[in-house]
Image (cartoon, coloured by chain):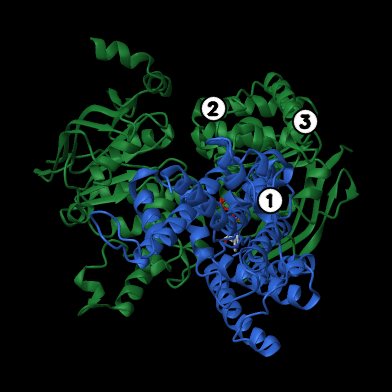
């Protein structure tokens, strides 16, 4: 295999593993820009993945699975919203609680319903997403350089993959070009300004939290209906936290979020590829080190290279008018 | 009978145990400027926020143009034509001026159309009222005076007929305040109604038609401005006679306690904020630093207090040098007899979430008086705080209350008590009475003069020229980072004003 070919394969798997990160980080972008910190991305994604796997297995319909994923994720978001917006609770505690509850209950419910050690049954073809070949992919494969890029890198992904990358400009447009986006960004910076402008802070933040739920639903569904054929316990494996790191790394901006997710996805893909293959000079790199790399990178880069990441000013603080 | 724009009947409001508004009645005539005055914590902001729908009254009725209005939230207030400029601005700092003005009044789901319209409307308002600001500037990059303009533009953009301004001049330079009053006059001429809250009685006398006085949650009087006087208003506010100008004897300066030589300070962008400043402060004298806000006074104060690094120069405290350019240690300076009342009490002087007694020892917590072995002696701390509360008449007299729940004037007293009761040799004070009512001003001024008479060296920075003139024994005027002149307190306001504007000083410096 020549170098070019290896690169195409590596980038192709980068895209594959980046998709849930992109969805989840964009989900976090919506709530955090509205001033609600959300450490529960992981839990929502996991809950959605389980719901998708379970419902798709029972109904044999991928679309029912996707719908279930989104609904469950919205439900969990609303729980987080109720705790942190209505009850003005601690947003970190609420997020962590959701992660724990979901991690435990998916296993219990999965075992109770399907008796496969916390898995959901393997999905048949109609019950999971299929890859899409872009028009003319096979015809151009033999064209040097551009051929493989089109046929192997860009073509042959799932519908949700294309959706994830389409969500990046869409999120940007919503945040920066619509009234909803203007208000959402404002409420994350100074809810007092929003309130005195005659807009309901609470309803606005709930809407942001629901957006987050929808996107996390896609992320979860991608895991159990596209990337694999069914739910496996703990299958998010920290992706929610990596998405959070990407969000900080990207300084809460949509385009940067995509690049941060692709970077972390690339590291992940590289780690998988290098597993067991000794590198020249350094020898075998422990896989744990590779897995820790996104976090290490975030810390190092935030510490000096990309400047300060300033979170939305009202982030994490419940809006209290009367002390 | 004149038209009544706003009528409040029986407005009552409590925040937990605090009864902020007690059965308030108020009538504001259409097309007039109506002043509201009262001590810190009297409930002025609360009352106005109820009128604006920001808070909900526990009981009472609001009438707008004679019709009952149920104002449930700011949205309904805006729809009946009420606009408000809050005491603490309600702006999104990393948004542009245009975005802030539009927020909540965007008139379509997609921004583009609205932006063009807003831009046009802003331009019109700008012309009509001489309210220039760059619509594309970020709020955080604007000085406070311009930020306030944006707040006013917000209200006008929503076509407010009734405009509430809550202490608008507290943050303005005298020239900016004049400009604001011209705008208010113009709005009044157009038939708009204005409610103005301020602590400055001179402003009340100069611009309002009527004035209402609040005291401890109650509306105690309403007067026609022409028929009242500053003295009467001050007495109504505080409930006793107030000395508007403190009396003080001759100073008897002793040894030099604080000597500043060639001090230069640059900010983080490398702009020179303090430029080669030298002066001395002797025991038993008050040296006042006058100047329009932003001419380096703040940075000078911070550099002397050891909070900000100076680029060059020396400072001698009690004859011993202080390392102002290198390793600075405010705790050591305190131990050596320096006390500092910072300009910005919220950010530098207090931890608002702490209880009063904790703030009363902030920075002095290693004093053996407050320690029992390795632990804090809570009883001793509370007892100490209670003594200060009594001595400085801090209200409410509760050492365990969270500091955020004290009004501005009382918070200031907490800081003053902490720093003054140390018996320092040198006291440096920034804006001692910013946002503080007349009763408390009198008290604070008296204490500062007492400190001087006890032989302390006092360095005072204030943007209030009256304050500088009535307290100081010598006045230094700063302009653009330099001391452009020294005057005696007898100098006229006009003379000092020219120096502050940098007109006279340049000549003098050139000579
Ligand atoms: N949001 C709030 N929650 C609880 N207590 C409050 C709140 N706002 C004001 N208070 C309390 O209500 C009382 C009246 O406060 P208010 O701000 O109306 O006074 P003010 O007359 O505007 O004073 P100042 O001149 O200092 O601005 C004070 O005791 C204050 O501590
Ligand atoms: Mg107030």
Q: CA distance from mark 3 to mark 1?
A: 28 Å
Q: From what the image shows, is residue A312 above or below residue B120?
A: below
Residues B310 and B268: in front is: B268
Q: Chain ID for label 2? A: B
Q: Give the image location of residue A164, x and y in percent.
A: 64, 52
Q: Please identify the quadrant where the C terminus of chain B is shown.
A: top left
- Per the image, the residue denoted by label 3 is B113
Confirm or reject: label 1 Cβ below 8 Å from ligand 1.
no
Q: Give the image location of residue A204, x and y in percent.
A: 71, 55
Q: Residue furthest left?
A: B320
Q: Secondary structure at mark 1?
A: helix
Confirm or reject: label 2 Cβ below 8 Å from ligand 2.
no
- Which colour denotes chain B? green
**Ligand 1 quadrant assignment:** bottom right
Residues A141 and A254: in front is: A141
Task: Name the N-terminal-most of marks 2 and 3.
Answer: 3
Residue at the spot 38% in from the left edge and 54% down from the top edge: A297
Q: From what the image shows, is residue B405 above or below residue A174?
A: below
- Per the image, the residue denoted by label 2 is B176
- Per the image, the residue denoted by label 1 is A163
* Nearest-to-viewer mark from 2 and 1: 1
Marks 2/1 same chain: no
Confirm or reject: label 3 Cβ below 8 Å from ligand 1.
no
Q: Secondary structure at mark 2?
A: helix
Q: Give the image location of residue B401, x and y in percent.
A: 48, 70
Letter of the blue chain: A
Marks 3/1 same chain: no
* Nearest-to-viewer mark from 3 and 1: 1
Q: Secondary structure at mark 3?
A: helix
């Amino acid at each position: 295999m020549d170098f070019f070919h290896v690169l195409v394969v590596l980038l192709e798997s980068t895209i594959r593993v980046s998709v849930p990160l992109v969805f989840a980080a964009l989900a976090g972008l919506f709530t955090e820009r509205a001033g609600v910190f959300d450490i529960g991305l992981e839990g929502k994604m996991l809950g959605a993945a389980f719901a998708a796997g379970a419902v798709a297995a029972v109904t044999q319909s991928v679309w029912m699975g996707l719908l279930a994923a989104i609904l469950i994720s919205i439900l969990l978001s609303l729980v987080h919203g109720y705790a942190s917006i209505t009850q003005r609770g601690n947003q970190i505690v609420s997020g962590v609680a959701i992660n724990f509850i979901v991690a435990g209950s998916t296993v219990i419910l999965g075992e109770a319903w399907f008796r496969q050690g916390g898995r959901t049954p393997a999905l048949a073809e109609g019950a999971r997403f299929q890859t899409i070949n872009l028009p003319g992919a096979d015809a151009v494969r033999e064209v040097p350089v551009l051929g493989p890029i089109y046929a192997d890198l860009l073509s042959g992904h799932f519908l949700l993959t294309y959706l994830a990358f389409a969500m990046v400009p869409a999120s940007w447009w919503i945040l920066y070009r619509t009234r909803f986006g203007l208000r959402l960004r404002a409420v994350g910076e100074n809810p007092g300004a929003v309130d005195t402008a005659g807009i309901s802070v609470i309803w606005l933040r709930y809407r942001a939290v629901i957006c987050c739920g929808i996107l996390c639903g896609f992320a979860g569904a991608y895991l159990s209906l596209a990337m694999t054929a069914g739910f496996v316990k703990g299958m998010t494996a920290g992706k929610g936290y990596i998405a959070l790191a990407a969000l900080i790394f990207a300084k809460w901006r949509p385009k940067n979020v995509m690049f941060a997710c692709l970077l972390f996805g690339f590291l992940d893909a590289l780690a998988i590829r290098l597993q067991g293959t000794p590198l020249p000079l350094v020898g075998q790199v422990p896989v744990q080190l590779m897995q820790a790399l996104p976090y290490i990178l975030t810390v190092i880069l935030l510490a000096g290279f990309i400047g300060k990441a300033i979170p939305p000013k009202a982030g994490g603080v419940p809006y209290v008018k009367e002390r | 009978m004149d038209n009544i724009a706003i009528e409040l009947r029986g407005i009552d409001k409590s925040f937990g145990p605090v009864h902020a508004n007690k059965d308030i009645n108020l009538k504001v005539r259409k097309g007039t400027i109506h002043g509201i005055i009262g001590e810190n914590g009297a409930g002025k902001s609360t009352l106005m926020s109820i009128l604006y729908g920001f808070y909900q009254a526990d009981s009472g009725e609001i009438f707008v143009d004679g019709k009952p209005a149920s104002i449930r939230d700011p949205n309904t207030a805006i729809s009946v034509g009420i606009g408000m400029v809050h005491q603490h601005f309600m702006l999104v700092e990393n948004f542009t001026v245009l975005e802030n003005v539009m927020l909540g009044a965007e008139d379509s789901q997609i921004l583009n159309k609205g932006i063009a319209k807003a831009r046009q409307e802003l331009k019109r308002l700008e012309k009509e009222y001489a309210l220039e600001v760059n619509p594309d500037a970020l709020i955080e990059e604007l000085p406070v005076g311009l930020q306030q303009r944006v707040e006013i533009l917000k209200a006008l953009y929503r076509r407010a007929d009734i405009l509430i301004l809550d202490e608008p001049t507290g943050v303005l330079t005298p020239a900016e305040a004049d400009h604001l009053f011209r705008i208010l006059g113009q709005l009044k001429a157009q038939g708009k109604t204005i409610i103005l809250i301020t602590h400055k009685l001179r402003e009340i006398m100069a611009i309002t038609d009527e004035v209402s006085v609040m005291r401890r949650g109650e509306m105690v009087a309403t007067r026609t401005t022409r028929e009242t006087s500053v003295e009467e208003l001050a007495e109504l506010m505080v409930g006793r006679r107030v000395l508007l100008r403190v009396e003080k004897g001759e100073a008897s300066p002793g040894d030099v306690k604080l000597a500043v030589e060639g001090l230069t300070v640059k900010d983080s962008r490398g702009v020179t904020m303090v430029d080669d400043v030298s002066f001395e402060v002797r025991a038993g004298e008050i040296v006042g630093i006058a100047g329009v806000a932003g001419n380096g006074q703040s940075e000078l104060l911070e550099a002397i207090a050891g909070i900000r690094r100076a680029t060059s120069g020396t400072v001698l405290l009690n004859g011993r040098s202080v390392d102002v350019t290198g390793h600075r240690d405010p705790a050591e300076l305190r131990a050596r007899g320096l006390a500092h009342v910072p300009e910005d009490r919220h950010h530098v002087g207090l931890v608002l979430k702490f209880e009063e007694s904790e703030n009363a020892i902030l920075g002095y917590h290693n004093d053996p008086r407050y320690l029992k072995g390795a632990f804090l002696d809570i009883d001793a701390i509370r007892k100490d705080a209670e003594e200060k509360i009594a001595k400085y008449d801090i209200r409410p007299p509760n050492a365990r209350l969270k500091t955020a729940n004290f009004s501005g004037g009382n918070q200031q007293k907490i800081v003053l008590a902490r720093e003054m009761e140390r018996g320092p040799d040198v006291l440096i004070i920034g804006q001692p009475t910013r946002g503080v009512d007349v009763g408390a001003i009198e008290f604070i001024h008296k204490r500062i003069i007492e400190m001087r008479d006890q032989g302390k060296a006092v360095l005072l920075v204030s943007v209030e020229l009256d304050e500088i003139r009535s307290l100081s024994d010598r006045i230094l005027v700063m302009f653009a980072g330099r001391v452009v002149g020294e005057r005696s307190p007898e100098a006229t306001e006009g003379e000092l004003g020219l120096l502050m504007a940098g007109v006279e000083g340049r000549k003098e410096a050139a000579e």
